[in-house]
Image: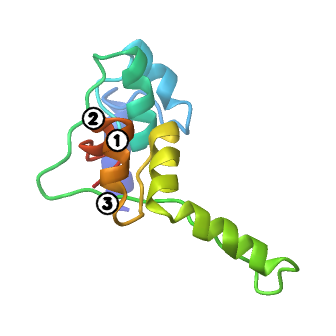
Amino acid sequence: DAAIGRLQKGVDTKQIRRFTGNDYTADLDKGDLAACLAWAGDVIQLQAGNPDIKYAIPAPGYITSSDNLLVPAHARHKANAEKLIDFYYEPANAAQLAAFISYVCPVEGVKEDLAKIDPALADNPLIIP
């Protein structure tokens, strides 16, 4: 209740203009947002066309996430699914994927392979935390 009250106060005083879903990227790109919580990959992709977009990592830390690959318990082609997962977890392949999508990479040992593709991505804490 206290958190909702603080948010409501921000809305009432016009400090919070609106709440968004994934459409926040258009406002961020246009400069209509001064600050937001954003997906790291969205920030990196927007920076390619708009170098004025910056990110800040709070000193106490931040939340990171990654997508997961799962195989249903009774999958008919479990071995094939596991081969695909193994493929994506090879550092060289994971580096290619990270370079293409610009999202955080959970694969250990990927930094060296990513540096061969794009040294800036290998040093980007939004991709390699």
Amino acid under label 1? Lys
Q: Nearer the viewer, residue 99 or 55?
A: 99
User: In the image as oriented, which residue stretches furthest toward the right?
Assistant: 76
Mark 1 → mark 2, Cα distance in angstroms: 10 Å
| Position of residue 22 measured from the top left corner of the image (x, y, whole percent) | 55, 37
Residue 26 vs 10, above or below: the answer is above
Q: Where on the picture, by quarter, is residue 45?
A: top left
Amino acid under label 3? Ala
Q: Quadrant of the N terminus?
A: bottom left
| Position of residue 110 measured from the top left corner of the image (x, y, whole percent) | 37, 57
Q: For the point 57% across and 61% down, which residue is it?
A: 88
Q: Where on the picture, by quarter, is residue 37?
A: top left
- For label 3, the SS is helix
Which colour style is shown?
rainbow
Task: Please name the residue that numbered disc 1 is placed on.
Answer: 116
N-term-proximal mark, 3 vs 2: 3
Residue 101 shown left or right of residue 10 in the figure: right
Residue 34 vs 21, above or below: the answer is above
* Residue 25 is at least partly visible in this image: yes
Disc ID at residue 120: 2
